Image (cartoon, rainbow, N blue to C red):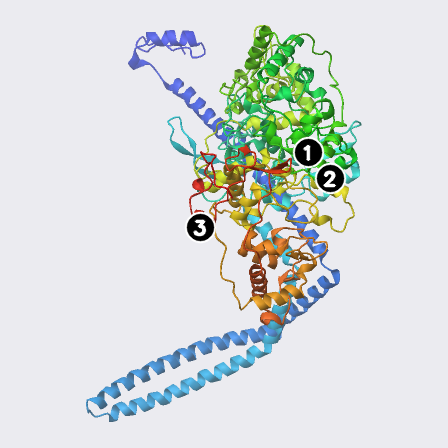
Amino acid sequence: MANTNPNMPPKAPWWNPAKFFAVRKSIPVEQRSYTKIYGILAILLFAFTVWAVLDEVMSRRPWKDIQADFKEFKATRLNLEIKKEKAKIDPAVRKELKKRLADLDKQMNSDSYKQTLDDITDLENKLYKAQRDYTFAKATSDETYYYLDEERTSHQDTTKRAKDYREIEAEKVVKLAVVNNLLHQDTILRSKILPIQKAYKEAQRVNDSVYANVIALQRKLDAVEAMPVAVKQTMLVNYEKTNFNNLKMRIDRCETCHLSYSDPLFKNDTIVSTDAKEVKAWLKANKYNDEEHYKIKKLGANKDTTVVIVSALFRLHPNVDLLLKTHKVDEPPAPGVLGCTSCHAGQGPSIVSPEFAHGFQEHWETPLLTGHYVEASCQSCHSGKMDFEGAKFITQGKKLFTDFGCYGCHSMPGYEDVPGQAPSLLNVSKKVTPQWIFQWIKNPKGWGKAARMPNFMLSDDEAKAITAFIVDQSKSSTYAPLAHGGGGGNALQGKQTFFDAGCVACHAIDDYKGDANMRIKEGNLFGANLNKEGSKVTSEWLFDWLKNPKNYLAHSRMPSLRLTDQEAADLTAYIMGHTGVNDDAKSSLTGDIADAGLIKKGETLVRGYGCFGCHEIKGMEKEAKVSVALNTFGKKTPGELFYGNVDGETLGNFRKTFAKEGLPLAEIETHAIHENQDWYTWTIGKMKNSRMYETERIPQKMPNFAMSDQEAYALNIFLRSQTGAFVPTGYGDSKMDPIQQGLDKGRMFVHWNNCVGCHKIESSGGLVAKFINEAFVGNENLAYFAPPYLGPEGDRVQEQWLHQFLSGPFKIRPMVKLRMPTYGFSDPEISTATNYFLSMHKRPLVMTSYDYPVNASLVPSGKMLFEKLKCLSCHTMGGVGANPPKSPDLENTKKRLRPEWVTKWIGHPDSLMPGTPMTSFWISGGKVAPADPQILNGDPYMQVKAVQEYVHSIGKNDIPTPTPYATINGSDKYILPNGDYEAAMLRAEIPNASMLMSKPTGELFAKKKSKKIAMK
């Protein structure tokens, strides 16, 4: 109907917005209608509210579905386990138990049994009333007697009170008789059913024992069914810093979805098989009936190998015993509780989607570290370690970074005081020829595939200039080899000496090969490969080097093997017989290298390439590092990296190649800046081809290390660990803790000196045992041949003895095949080694006296046991005893071993050194037992103490004299306490307990400023 009222405002056509607002503008404000606007807005508000609720409940809470799926799946698995456990029980036993319980249950449900129970119930009601009546009667009697006694005391008439008391007492006796009668009836009734109840209880106990595992699983099943669907989180107290440098808490909610991470029920998580039926049966047996539970991969050239990997949502955490039991993960909030993201990274608080939770979104700085890259986090908290148990790749990567000498060009925390990796060039012209130097720097790998010296890709002119400079700067060297020419050696005997003297522990030659794909300086990859040494050095130099390494290089890591002249000559003949050429040599040195301009050009090149970072070069001792610092390289974004002209396909091929080799690069966010341009591919590319990103306008100098894929992968993981991340107090190893400092310095020390080449220390080492086992396979005494395990060393030996031994090693174990060399350590270096061994057992470095009065009452019993157990069938005592001796001479025990350790060792040697040939005389059937029931009343602890006291009582009162560093022309040479080598000087007498007892660690072995020391 048309609007005919002139006072009514015109209607605005709401379906035409432009006209609508034009018409509304002409209508006075007080006459405008808002009904339709409010109606539309209300409808929109309602729609958006419904959408928000649905989005929140259905789209943004996938974890609810995950938890529901997990509960269902775990219940299925538990039912499966219950079924398996029931199947393990003998059917006859199950049948008998079932029958017995059924019979007893039948008896307990019989009418007579139930009637007896009813009678007992009625009787209990009567007894309750009778006991109540008796209690009241007794209370009334006590009250009456009290007043009676009061009347007697006050000499009142007690006739009436006495009569009342007698009547009440008579009533009490009657009521007591009623109670006793009812109790008697109760006993009779209960005796009728007691045998049945006892029999049922015993049958139930047997049943619970037989079905113990089933019952435990059933309880878990009940707990699963009662488990609420809820967000689970761990709070990391004071773990992060805000932009204002204030500490704040981190929240981890990873376990909201990853509910199985610590549940051993989910340990069966992988199967590899070529049989499709086996795979199908395995999936069925483990109830993996949903493709969301697992992924299937096909491997092999013909894709005939099936690998089934269970989803991380239904899998036990790898290395659960090592990692979860040694790290606090989800305990109540407290410093040191690590959660998940401290190791795995990702976006801990987010549970919206896997992509958000794992941090795979643009601009999130710490995405999830997938695969082996999670090992990179170990370095953040344990930066002083060299060996990370259960983390192979970060261990290899850190050692490669050290052994390739990367810190020579790049700054890195922890490497500020580490010397260069490569040999000194101060005397090099007295060792090798210019021709050899030229070919070596042109292509080091031509001399050996395990060479760590990188290829600088030099032109012939550049290589010639550098050769000229290196030769020129060493011309002023005063080094001269020993007068003995090294002739007259027997090469065949030299080969045997090579093994016996322990050269095999550090050097590769002939059949003693190392792994050229992993060039870590440990084992026989520590020193040079000697297969072409005869074409590198002269026999005169080699003989002198073998006899006295410090004559050529004062701070050489090559130790003295205390060789006789004949042994050195034999070794020289053997090694010099191994010759060869540079396999990749395409040119040779020609022309004059004494030209001043050429030498100057070589010096410029050496400075530019930073050769002084690894080598000691005259005049370049104070030069700065030539490349960028790497302390925060691991957190660089793709936008901070330069890709040159490298295309995405080339970068993508790195991912494909490494994945095929079982070395997958970490997953990345989907919004990479450009295709395949990410941190992982860039870094792998740089290590595989150091100059692949070079352009005409941006040259690059990094040399090519010709890394294997395994080396590049391990280094990639180590570099990813370099994020400069803040590690709060209470998390990780404390840098201020003296024990931790001792461990950190010691770990670098034993790696630097290849102690692990011979000895197993902590979780690694003992690499030479492979060659010993091969050489003496089948020998009954093989267990005695390998160098000892040094894990217990800090708890085992006395500090003074260890100092003396390291200053000049002497023979301890008569059957060990290799010779412990003399390293020529200074006192501070010996202090580092000693402190390391002590720190492994939480002991400070304090020189301690272990002299004490022997318990004379125990010595006779100890001697009886010593003789009865035939200790001298393996040991000797002052050279008397086993022939040939297998174990150390016990005469040295008093000054060598700590008495408390000797007691533990005698009592249970296998607990200290698993696999030791030492017999456990006081352990029988896994329990402590006397070695002789007649001695010391059969007390095993007193017997062990008695043997220890006896051995201590007959020990020598002095430590063996240190062996000389070398014997040159009949004269013994020693190393001064400050590490210097001087002819004809004896080492100063070591500090004794009276001098150093309880002094702080830093004052123990202070470096001497003067070389004038007291003669021994």
Mark 3 secondary-structure assignment? helix
| Res 597 quadrant in image | top right
Mark 1 secondary-structure assignment? helix
| Disc with the residue nearer the chain's start (1 vs 3) | 1
Nearest to the observer: residue 966 or residue 370? 966
Nearest to the observer: residue 613 or residue 667? 613
Say whether residue 298 is left or right of residue 864.
right
Asked whether the residues under the numbered discs 1 and 3 touch, taking CB atoms below 8 Å apart as contact, a structural biologist would say no
Kindly identify the amino acid type of the residue bearing the numbered disc 1.
Answer: Asn
Asked whether the residues under the numbered discs 1 and 2 touch, taking CB atoms below 8 Å apart as contact, a structural biologist would say yes
Q: Is residue 782 above or below residue 542?
A: below
Q: Position of residue 99 (x, y in %)?
A: 70, 66
Crowd class of label 3 (few under 14; some 14 to 19; many from 20; radius 10 Å) = few
Q: Position of residue 963 (x, y in %)?
A: 60, 43
Residue identified by numbered label 3: 994
| Res 472 quadrant in image | top right
Crowd class of label 2 (few under 14; some 14 to 19; many from 20; radius 10 Å) = some
Say whether residue 739 is left or right of residue 272.
left
Asked whether the residues under the numbered discs 2 and 3 touch, taking CB atoms below 8 Å apart as contact, a structural biologist would say no
Nearest to the observer: residue 412 or residue 201? 412
Asked whether residue 329 is in view, the answer is: no
| Disc with the residue nearer the chain's start (1 vs 2) | 1
Q: Is residue 726 above or below residue 591?
A: below
Mark 2 secondary-structure assignment? helix
Residue identified by numbered label 1: 524
Kindly identify the amino acid type of the residue bearing the numbered disc 3.
Answer: Ser
Kindly identify the amino acid type of the residue bearing the numbered disc 2.
Answer: Phe
| Res 931 quadrant in image | bottom right
Numbered disc in front, either 2 or 3: 3
Asked whether residue 616 is in view, the answer is: yes
Nearest to the observer: residue 153 or residue 273? 273
Residue identified by numbered label 2: 771
